[in-house]
Amino acid sequence: MSDTAMLELTDIVKDYRIGTQSVRALDRIDLRIEAGDFTSIIGPSGSGKSTLLHLLGALDSPDSGSIRFRGQEIGALDEQRQSEFRRHQVGFVFQFFNLLPTLTAWENVAIPKLLDGTGLRKAKPRAMELLERVGLADRAAHRPAELSGGQMQRVAVARALIMDPPLILADEPTGNLDSKTGAAILELLGDIARNGNAVVMVTHDMGAVEYSDRVITLRDGRIGSDDRVDRTGAGSVHA
C-alpha cells in the first residue's frame, strides 16, 4: 500500500434528520481507497452504502472527520469547488444510466466535455475512442431507445471516462441488467481498475463481489468487514 492513498477517510460521521429525530448514517468511518483497486461496498438497505458513495464523490459533505483525495482535503469544499472536483476527478456510473434520450451514444459520452467548455466537434474523437473501448463503436449514432440495457450502461461507462478521472464511482451498475450482461459490465469495470483507476461500486448483487479486488461490508453505518479477494481461488483474505 502506498503512503498516500487516492482517497483517505478518517473518523467520518454523517447524520440525517428525519422529522424530529437524528439518524446516524455513517459512524466514525476510517477507510483508504487505492488506485488500481476495484472495491465493492455491500450491506443491507440503510447500512450507509449510498451515503458513503456520495461522500466519496463530493455529492455531500460529512458532519465531521476528514476526506482527503491525493492528500488534499475535500470533505469541507464549498459548492463550487465540489462541482469542479466532481467534473474533473470523478466519473459516475448509475443504475438507471441517466442518458439523454434525444442525443446519440457518442453525444451522450461527450456531455461532460461540453459542460467543461469543449466544442462538440472537438469532443467527438475522444468519445468515439471510448465507445470503441467499451465495444460500441458500431452503435455510436444510435439513440438510447435504440440500445439494449447493457449497451446503455456501456455508454454510461464511456461517459464516466471521458474526463480521464482517476476515480470511478458506480451505484448499482448491474441493477437493471440480466446476469450475463451484468457480468460483462463488471469485467469492464475491473479492466478500468487494472488500468490504474480506483473503482468503487455499491451493490446489492452478491454475485458482483467475485469481480472485485476488495469487498467492504457496511452494517449500521460502520465497517463490519474489509476483505481482499484472493484471485488464486482460495477464497478471501481479511485485509
Image (cartoon, helix red, strand yellow):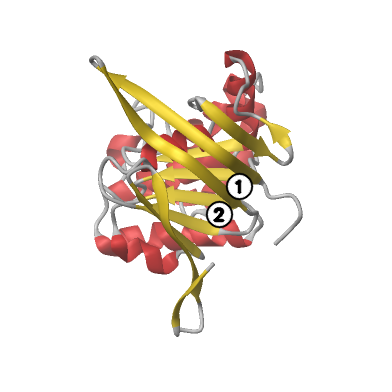
Q: Quadrant of the C terminus?
A: bottom right
For marks 1 and 2, give the CA distance.
Answer: 6 Å
In this image, 43 relative to 60: left or right? left
Secondary structure of the residue carrying numbered label 2: helix
Q: Identify the residue under disc 1.
A: 129
Q: Is residue 141 visible?
A: no
Q: Residue at x 29, y 57 (%)?
A: 205
Q: Is residue 192 left or right of residue 236?
A: right
The kind of residue on which mark 2 rests is Arg
Tell me the amino acid under the disc marked 1: Glu
Q: Is residue 145 among what the camera can see?
A: yes
Q: Who's the residue at 29% across and 47% down the image?
A: 149
**Label 1 environment density (alpha carbons within 10 Å; few <14, some 14–19, many ≥20):** some
Question: Quadrant of residue 7 in the image?
Answer: top right
Quarter the N terminus occupies: bottom right
Q: Give neighbour class at mark 2: few <14, some 14-19, many 20+ (Cα, 10 Å).
A: few
Check disc 2 and report the residue beneath it. 133
Residue 35 location (% of width, % of height): 65, 54
Q: Nearer the viewer, residue 80 or 106?
A: 80
The part of the image, by quadrant, that contains residue 90 is: top right
